[in-house]
């Protein structure tokens, strides 16, 4: 741990990230760890270099989304493992967008993995670890006041727009965007409230399959013990053109985080 990190107040530690107080009011520092969990915390491990790559990948995707007018919490990357973000009030819903059947959908409905969906599907899960993030409908969300009908409409339309954009972006680098998870937050601008994309977008929360071979290039390699987990994250970054030249796998080690670039 370097002193810069210790100096900052740690506000929250999650499974893959830590949030620290930011340098200015209304900001936070998001630190990306190498820790990985799956199956509601039952499987735990580390993926060496994951934090460094996810920090970069999420920076890249959030910046691109910002350019097409999707509001996000992302401000700028600070160093190998940290980024400056706007402090938002997280809406306690995980928004999953699906294009092709995989994971829990395959299991729940008994549909073969890889089946192309007739159209993209948006699902909601209530963020509650103790309950294993149960699936909920828009009715639960609005009835319990987790989000208003208006907010939910905005979230749906942003999620679909993000899906359209990212599907095209990944297809351009030979990857199929099978499904992914998003989180949104409320950001106040004086008296006005906006819904913004929060959390991260990385192979931790996306399923990405190679277009030609259907090889999995995401966290399923960890979930299903498929091996070459680190390599898959590196390959995604490489195809996006953001694996910093000169960084070789050994250098994407946890200690590398401590250095500012
Ligand atoms: N996902 C996630 N966090 C979760 C649950 C799911 O990031 O807590 C992502 C997952 O990586 C996948 C998509 O959401 O890209 C759909 O996941 P699914 O519902 O199939 O659940 P899983 O099979 O991961 O349990």
Image: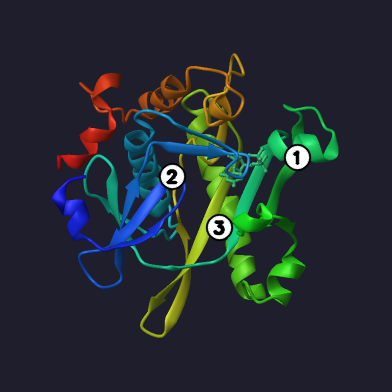
The residue lying at 21 percent from left, 69 percent from top is: 24
The residue furthest right is: 110
Tell me: 232 left or right of 259: right
Residue 79 in percent (x, y) is at 21, 44
The disc label shown at residue 105, or none: 1
The disc label shown at residue 191, or none: none
User: Between marks 2 and 3, how big is the CA–CA gap?
Assistant: 24 Å
Q: Give the quarter of the figure containing the C terminus.
A: top left
Ligand 1 neighbours mark 1 (CB distance < 8 Å): yes
Mark 3 residue crowding within 10 angstroms, few (<14) / some (14–19) / many (20+): some
The residue lying at 34 percent from left, 30 percent from top is: 49
User: Between marks 2 and 1, how big is the CA–CA gap?
Assistant: 24 Å
The disc label shown at residue 158, or none: 3
Q: Is residue 225 above or below residue 74?
A: above
**SS at badge 1:** helix
Residue 34 in percent (x, y) is at 38, 36
Mark 2 residue crowding within 10 angstroms, few (<14) / some (14–19) / many (20+): some
Q: In this view, does 87 lie above or below 232?
A: below
Q: Can residue 248 be seen in this view?
A: no
Q: Which colour scheme is used?
A: rainbow
Q: Is residue 87 visible?
A: yes
**SS at badge 2:** loop
């Amino acid at each position: 741990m370097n002193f810069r990190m210790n100096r900052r107040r740690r506000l929250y530690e999650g499974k893959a990230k830590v949030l620290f107080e930011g340098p200015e009011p209304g900001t936070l520092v998001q630190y990306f760890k190498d820790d990985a969990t799956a199956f509601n915390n039952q499987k735990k491990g580390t993926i060496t270099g994951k934090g460094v790559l996810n920090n970069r990948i999420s920076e890249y995707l959030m910046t691109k989304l910002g350019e097409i007018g999707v509001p996000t919490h992302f401000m700028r990357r600070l160093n190998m493992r940290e980024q400056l973000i706007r402090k938002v009030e997280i809406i306690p819903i995980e928004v999953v967008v699906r294009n092709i059947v995989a994971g829990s959908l395959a299991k729940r409905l008994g549909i073969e993995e890889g089946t192309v969906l007739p159209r993209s599907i948006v699902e909601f899960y209530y963020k509650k670890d103790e309950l294993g993030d149960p699936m909920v409908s828009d009715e639960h969300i609005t009835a319990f006041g987790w989000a208003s009908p208006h907010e939910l409409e905005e979230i749906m339309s942003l999620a679909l727009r993000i899906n359209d954009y990212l599907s095209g972006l990944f297809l351009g680098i030979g990857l199929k965007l099978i499904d992914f998870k998003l989180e949104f937050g409320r950001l106040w601008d004086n008296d006005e409230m906006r819904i913004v994309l929060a959390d991260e977008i990385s192979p931790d929360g996306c399923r990405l399959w190679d277009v030609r071979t259907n090889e999995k290039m995401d966290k399923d390699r960890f979930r299903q013990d498929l091996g070459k987990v680190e390599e898959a994250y590196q390959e995604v970054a490489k195809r996006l053109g953001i694996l910093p030249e000169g960084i070789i796998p050994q250098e994407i080690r946890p200690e590398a985080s401590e250095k500012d670039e």
